[in-house]
Amino acid sequence: MRKLAAMIALVALVVGSPASAKGLNNLQAGVTGLLTFWADPVWSAVDPPESFDDMFGAPVTPHVVGFFQGTLLMVYRVTMGAFDVAMFPLWVFPTLSPEPRFDFAEDSQVEYE
């Protein structure tokens, strides 16, 4: 129970804190990526990228390909989010996580490179 409370407190601290230092920036970007990865396949299937509009079978194919593209993006987001969280004390690394589809903390100023 203590581990769960510590994890919730860490997530609340990271999401609610301003990311002014490079290390906190990476930590906040990584935690946000780990919390929002599940939305990528669904979001890409519902609203595929505009570059998919010219595909063969345009009414249906962009949504199917968007689902698979979102699944690959989900794997990338989880991997880079975990790397950002693991390496946040070494602030020399740039933020590797992709920009999230939505933010939990709307007033956060995370810098993505």
Image (tube, helix red, strand yellow):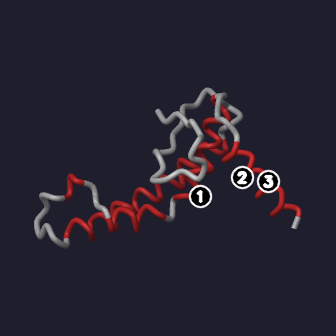
Q: Which residue is mark 3?
A: 9
Residue located farthest toward the right when viewing the structure as drawn: 2
Assess disc 3: are there few (<14), some (14-19) or many (≥20) residues with their C-alpha within 10 Å of its C-alpha: few
| Residue corresponding to mark 1 | 35
At label 1, the amino acid type is Leu
- Which one is nearer the viewer's eye here, 87 or 27? 27
Q: Is residue 14 left or right of residue 79?
A: right
Residue where numbered disc 2 is placed: 11
Q: Residue at x 57, y 49 (%)?
A: 81
Q: What whole-number distance in Å separates the C-alpha atoms at marks 1 and 2? A: 10 Å
Q: Give the vertical position of 10 relative to 90 (above or below).
A: below
Mark 2 or mark 1, which is nearer the start of the sequence? 2
User: In the rendered image, which quarter is residue 72 located in?
Assistant: bottom left
Figure quadrant of residue 63: bottom left
Look at the picture and state if 90 lies above or below 55. Answer: above
Q: Which residue occupies 16% across, 70% down?
A: 59
**Discs 1, 2 touching: Cβ within 8 Å:** yes
Percent x, y of residue 50: 22, 53
The answer to whether the residues at label 3 and label 1 have Cβ atoms under 8 Å apart is no
Identity, as a three-letter code, of the amino acid under mark 2: Val
Going from N to C along the chain, the mark reached first, 3 or 1, is 3
Image point (45%, 53%), residue name: 101
Helix, strand or loop for disc 1: helix
Q: Position of residue 19 (x, y in %)?
A: 64, 34
Looking at the rendering, in which quadrant would you find the N terminus? bottom right
Q: Position of residue 89 (x, y in %)?
A: 71, 34
Circle 2 crowding by C-alpha within 10 Å: few under 14, some 14–19, many from 20: some
Q: Are marks 3 and 2 in contact (CB under 8 Å)?
A: yes
Q: CA distance from mark 3 to mark 1?
A: 15 Å
* Cα–Cα span, label 3 and label 2: 5 Å
Q: Amino acid at mark 3?
A: Ala
